[in-house]
Image (cartoon, helix red, strand yellow):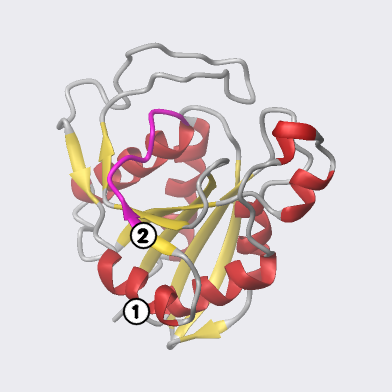
Amino acid sequence: MKKLLITGFQPFDGESVNPALEVAKGLQGKTINGYEVIAREIPVVRFEALKAVQAAIEELQPNAVITIGQAGGRPDITVERVGINIDDFRIPDNKGNQPIDEPVVTGGPVAYWATLPIKKMVANVKAQGIPASVSNSAGTYVCNHLLYGLLHYLTTQGKTAIPAGFIHIPYLPEQMAVRSGKDAQVATMSLDTLLKGFETMIAALD
């Protein structure tokens, strides 16, 4: 059976939960579209996140890789098109690193295209009545760092046949329940809806 590696970040920036990790855990052990889903928890730490994913790839030898991150403020599931070679953190990572205008990989290409079937994935999600779109910016925080670093690693290791990419998701409702006023007026999506969306995206893989 084919294997799909799915990673979710730990909570960060004072949050007690990260929807990315909850989705990964919710998919762990499922068989979808002929793929056995294997989840891994990833630290929100520059370079350490990438090392964790690389180690998981070497261990599992997956046939596809999907990395997931929280995008507070986005109202839909957004499948990232491109990772860029820049770290410019608006907030420190979980180890206090806050690089400004530093490359993910010194001397690396400016950018890499994700190799997931991004438009088919979005179409599958929307067909289920779940908001989704292609995103042209994964930001410049650890999410983009991981996307670019993952694609660079696969390219330089001769593993470009492995489809890989990054998907951003909204907050969970419970993350807004502990806030008040304008701070609580941010788009959310339930875990059940997110899991349904990811199952349809996995169905888009060959």
Q: Which corner quadrant of the image does residue 160 belong to?
A: bottom left
Please give the name of the residue rendered at 33% of the width and 75% of the height, measured from the top-left corner.
123
Q: In the rendered structure, which amino acid carries the disc numbered 2?
A: Ser
Would you say the magenta stretch is mainly helix, strand or loop? loop
Please give the name of the residue rendered at 71% of the width and 33% of the height, measured from the top-left corner.
183
Q: In the image, is residue 187 above or below residue 206? A: above
Residue topped by disc 1: 204
* Magenta segment boundaries in residue numbering: 134-141
Decide which of 181, 155 is in the foreground and name it.
181
Please give the name of the residue rendered at 16% of the width and 30% of the height, measured from the top-left corner.
110
106 left or right of 125 in image:
left
Is disc 2 placed on a helix, strand or loop? strand
The answer to whether residue 51 is magenta is no
Q: How many marks?
A: 2
Of callouts 2 and 1, the N-terminal one: 2
Q: In the rendered structure, which amino acid carries the disc numbered 1?
A: Ala
